[in-house]
Image (spheres, helix red, strand yellow):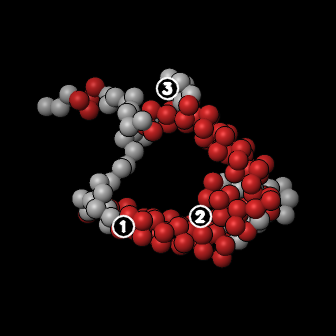
Amino acid sequence: MMKVAIALISGALFGAGLALSGMADPMRVRAFLDLLGPWDPTLAFVMGGAMIPMAVAWVVQKRLERSLAGAAFNLPETRRLDWKLALGAILFGIGWGLGGLCPGPAIASLALKPIHAAPFVLAMLAGMALNRFAPSGTAGTSQRAKGTSSHRPPASETQRG
């Protein structure tokens, strides 16, 4: 029950932040990405403002053994940059630039402007499904979704002493 309450509170805070900052509006996002037109720096301030509580959260997390809901922390195992991450970032950026939405604001926009957001959300879900059902050798996150990882630490991490 605690997990559900935390998820609802977090989602409500996120949605309220999107609505209050105007980041659920694709035109505001496009104006941020349009460096040659009437540039709107609002998104930079929202991102900068998000870094402060996130930095505090990382400091607090290091002192905790478990999350507030009692679950173990599920943190990424690796910081390796590879072609899958680069390609995913490029595809994400193209979708963000064309649609003016990324996943969080897209879901929030379903409540605000469902006719405009629905095609984007459906295409986003189709892309996620393609990744999930792709053979494990071609999609980076499909292995993590199954609870396994292809990451092996470098020899220097496994041979201590």
Name the residue furthest bottom.
Answer: 20
* Residue 73 at x, y percent in the picture: 33, 54
As drawn, is 51 to the left or to the right of 60?
right
Judged by depth in the image, the label closer to the viewer, 1 or 3, is 1
Mark number for residue 1? 1
Disc 2 designates what residue?
47
74 to 81, vertically: above or below: below
Identify the residue position indicated by label 3 in the image. 136
**Cα distance in 3D space between marks 1 and 3:** 33 Å
Callout 3: few (<14), some (14-19), or many (20+) C-alpha neighbours within 10 Å?
A: some
Can see residue 158? yes
Q: Quadrant of the N terminus?
A: bottom left
x and y, in percent, of residue 153 in the image: 32, 31
Is residue 86 visible from the viewing direction of this image? no
In the rendered view, does 94 fall on the left or right side of 150?
Answer: right
Amino acid carrying mark 2 in the image: Met
Residue 161 placement (x, y as % from top left): 13, 31
8 and 158: which one is in front?
A: 8
Comes first in the chain, label 2 or label 3: 2
Tell me the amino acid under the disc marked 1.
Answer: Met
